[in-house]
Each structure stands twice: as C-alpha cells, then as structure tokens.
Image (cartoon, rainbow, N blue to C red):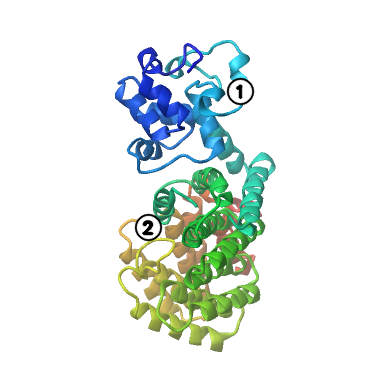
C-alpha cells in the first residue's frame, strides 16, 4: 500500500497490515473501524473528509451497511488520500499534485463536503442552472436504471433512510431537504444497475419510489411543479416495478396535489381518481389521501356534488385507519393533515362553519405544526373570513401568516395560496395593497 503523505490517516494506521488487507478487499467497514479505533479520526471527521453522512459512516464501520458504489469509493479514496490503485481504482487526480495537509488543517481547500453545500446553494437559488441540471441528471439516470433488468446488498440502510425522510421537514428549510434527498439518491443510483434477485429488485424499487416521491413533494412545495411532475413520474415507474399498488396510489395522490395547488383542479381530480382506483376499497392511508385530494379538487373546480361525496368517503376511510396508517409521516394519513384537507375542501364548498372547526382541530392535533402548515391553515381561515364577508380581517390574517414566514418559505405553495386569496378580494379592500406588496404584485 502506498499513501500520499501527509494524509488525514494516522501514520501507524497506514502501516497496519489489517488496513492494507482491508484496502485490497475493498472492505470499507474494516477500513472505517480501524481509522476510528486509531483514536485520531472520529466518524464525523471521516464523514467530512469523504462526503458521507456521519450516521452512515457509523453503520458502515459496524458492518451494518456496505459500500458498493464506485463514486462513493472514489470519494473515500479522495477524502482519506488513498491512492486509487490501493482500492482497485484509476489513479486519483490529486496523486500527481503537491501533497495536501491533513483534513483538520485545511482551510478553504477542496473539501468533498462542499459539493453538497454548493448543490444546496444552487437549489436554493431558484431551481435553475446547475441545481436543476443536477436534479435532471439524477432523475434521468434513475429512469435508465429502472428500465434495465438488473442485488442490492444494502437495502436495510436505504429503507431506514427513506423512513427518516418520511417524517417531513422537522424545521429544515425545503431547499436543504431537497439537496439532501438529491445527494442520497445520487449515492443510491448505481445500485439500481446491479444484478439482483426479484425480491431485492422489488424492495429497491420500493425505496426508490418513496425517495423520488418525497423529492417531488419538496419540489412541489418550492413551486417547481413541472420538475415535480417529472419526479412523480419516476416515482410512479419505480412503484409499478415494486409491485406495490398502494405505493403507486400514494404517488398519484401526492402528484394530484401539484395541479390542485397550481390552478388545474380538473387535472388534479383525474389523478386523484386514478389513485382511488388503485388503492381500492380497503381502508389505507393512500386511499384516504386520494379521496381527500379529490374532495378538494372537485370543490375548487365547482363540482359540489362530487366534492361532497369525496368528503363523505374520506371521512369514512379516516375513521377506519389503523394507528400505523394514521402515522404523522409523508406516507401516512394523520388526522391533523386530514383536518387540513377538510379545511380547504369545506372552505371552497362554502361550509365555513365546518371549515373553521377543521382548522381549529388541525392546530389542536399538532403540538408544534410546521411553519408551512401553520401558514396554510391561517390562509384557509382568511379565505373563510372573506367568504363570510369580513374581508378586512381576511387580509389581516393572511398578511400576518404569510409575512411572518422566513423568506425561504415565502414561495411555492404558501405564495400560491396567499395569491389566490389576494386575487378574489375586491380592489377597495382595506389592507389588500399591503398583502400585494408582500406578494410582490402590488
């Protein structure tokens, strides 16, 4: 073994035969464990050097996850300054450069973790240029892999990763979640091309469908509905290949929320009805979601009869779901989100009494509603006030809710909903211009 010096690895470790053998076998679990046990490199430092999440580094070191992706192996070689030949890779670009200082002594040099920061910045800057190109490249490659007939030895890690994302934003800005999802999908992508058993392929496609669907949700929340539709198409393709009809129904139900929230209720109703057909009559989170979106779409589109039927359906389904199906995740149908759906459907049906009740219940059911959820409920409340004739109060409530959001949240869905209220208020409504200034339309 020959390592560039001075690298971040302790000198004694570079001379350890166990370390040399681990490199020859591409045994990254042993490599990380030995580096950690040497006492100079924490999992966090390995994470920073290699551009891998610290929890994944820990799992790899414990033997609970494997590294099979060539790009990840290359990042490990570059981060720990291991020559390419030692891991069966091509010579690394830095091997002919001036030796670098250890990772802990580097200033603003080429830190692999900066790749994610650059991506996060590009995505936060408006989903254009570099950020959008990277998303498109990831999605296109996943589509190509799904079209191939290719065993994923690391399913447990990726299943747990998808589950973790399923709990939502948890105070993170949508652009940050988008960057993390894109980075994880990029790391997972090569595994789709590996030869697999039918069972492993199905499980991997299921995880891919979940991850792609969640990325599409974030794109929707950020207002990029065209790219969201593309990612939902990828998620639907993966769900079909997984053989899980409920996952496919969930994808379609979530996709229906894109046209629903961006001015195409007829298209939303069509997608929601497809999701309802796939989900069937058995109570499930996907079936409840599809019915709720259908209720909102028909109500917004002015078809009161179909909207009321869908409201009845979703209330029947919601009462019959198991605690697991009611879980407060992107894949569940929690009662708090049920009340949010009912709030908008009932608002557009003009049933403001029940809409107010749904809004109060939504807030009561959530000890700490997210910034976006709180703002959307408030805007629904403002819409009810406007319907009941109290337009000045409606403007005040909407402006306080929308204007109180951090700048990173005043786009996409919140902006669209506030703008819809602004547009239906008469020009002489007191305070309307103030709301317009917040929305940059006055």
Secondary structure beneath label 2: loop
State yes or no: discs 2 and 1 in contact (Cβ < 8 Å): no
Residue 442 visible to an observer of this rendering: no
> Disc 2 or disc 1, which is closer to the eye?
1
For the point 52% across and 72% down, which residue is it? 249
Residue highlighted by disc 2? 369
Task: Point out the image quarter for the C terminus.
Answer: bottom right
Q: Quadrant of residue 323?
A: bottom left
280 to 325, vertically: above or below = below
Residue highlighted by disc 1? 91
For this rendering, which residue is in front, 165 or 223?
A: 165
Residue 405 visible to an observer of this rendering: yes
**Circle number at residue 389:** none
Measured as percent of width and height from the top left, residue 383 is found at 51, 70
For this rendering, which residue is in front, 79 or 262?
A: 79
Measured as percent of width and height from the top left, residue 175 is found at 53, 45
Measured as percent of width and height from the top left, residue 45 is found at 40, 26
If you read the primary sequence from the N terminus, does the residue marked by circle 2 or circle 1 appear first?
1
For this rendering, which residue is in front, 127 or 350?
A: 127
For the point 66% across and 46% down, which residue is it? 137
For the point 51% across and 50% down, which residue is it? 409
């Amino acid at each position: 073994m020959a390592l560039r010096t001075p690298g971040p690895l302790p000198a004694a470790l570079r001379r350890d035969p166990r370390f040399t053998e681990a490199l020859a076998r591409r045994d990254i679990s042993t490599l990380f464990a030995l580096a950690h046990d040497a006492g100079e490199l924490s999992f966090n430092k390995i994470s920073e050097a290699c551009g891998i999440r610290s929890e994944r580094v820990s799992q790899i070191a414990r033997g609970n996850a494997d590294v099979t992706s060539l790009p990840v192996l290359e990042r490990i070689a570059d981060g720990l300054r291991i020559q390419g030949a030692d891991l069966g890779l091509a010579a690394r670009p830095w091997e002919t450069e001036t030796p670098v200082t250890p990772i802990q002594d580097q200033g603003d040099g080429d830190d692999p973790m900066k790749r994610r920061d650059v991506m996060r910045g590009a995505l936060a800057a408006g989903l254009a240029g570099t950020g959008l190109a990277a998303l498109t490249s990831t999605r296109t490659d996943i589509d190509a892999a799904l079209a191939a007939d290719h065993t994923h030895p690391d399913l447990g890690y990726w299943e747990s990763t998808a589950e973790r994302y399923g709990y939502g934003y948890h105070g993170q800005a949508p652009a940050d979640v988008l960057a993390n999802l894109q980075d994880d999908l990029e790391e997972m992508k090569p595994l789709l091309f590996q030869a697999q058993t039918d069972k492993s392929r199905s499980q991997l496609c299921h995880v891919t469908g979940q991850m792609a669907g969640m990325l599409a949700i974030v794109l929707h929340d950020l207002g990029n509905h065209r790219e969201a539709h593309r990612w939902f198409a990828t998620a639907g393709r993966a769900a079909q290949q997984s053989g899980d009809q409920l996952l496919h129904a969930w994808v379609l139900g979530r996709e229906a929320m894109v046209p629903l929230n961006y001015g195409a209720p007829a298209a939303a109703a069509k997608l929601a009805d497809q999701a309802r057909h796939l989900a069937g009559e058995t109570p499930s989170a996907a079936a409840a979601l599809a019915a709720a979106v259908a209720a909102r779409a028909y109500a917004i589109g002015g078809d009161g009869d179909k909207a009321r039927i869908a409201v009845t359906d979703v209330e029947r389904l919601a009462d019959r779901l198991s605690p697991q199906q009611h879980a407060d995740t992107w894949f569940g149908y929690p009662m708090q989100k049920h009340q949010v759906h009912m709030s908008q459907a009932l608002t557009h049906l003009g049933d403001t009494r029940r809409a107010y009740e749904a809004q109060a219940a939504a807030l009561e059911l959530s000890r700490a509603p997210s910034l976006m959820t709180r703002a959307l409920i408030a805007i629904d409340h403002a819409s009810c006030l406007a319907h009941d004739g109290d337009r000045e109060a409606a403007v005040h409530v909407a402006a306080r809710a929308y204007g109180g959001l951090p700048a990173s949240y005043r786009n996409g869905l919140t902006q669209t909903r506030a703008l819809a209220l602004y547009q239906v208020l008469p020009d002489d409504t007191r305070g309307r211009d103030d709301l317009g200034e917040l929305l940059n339309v006055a």
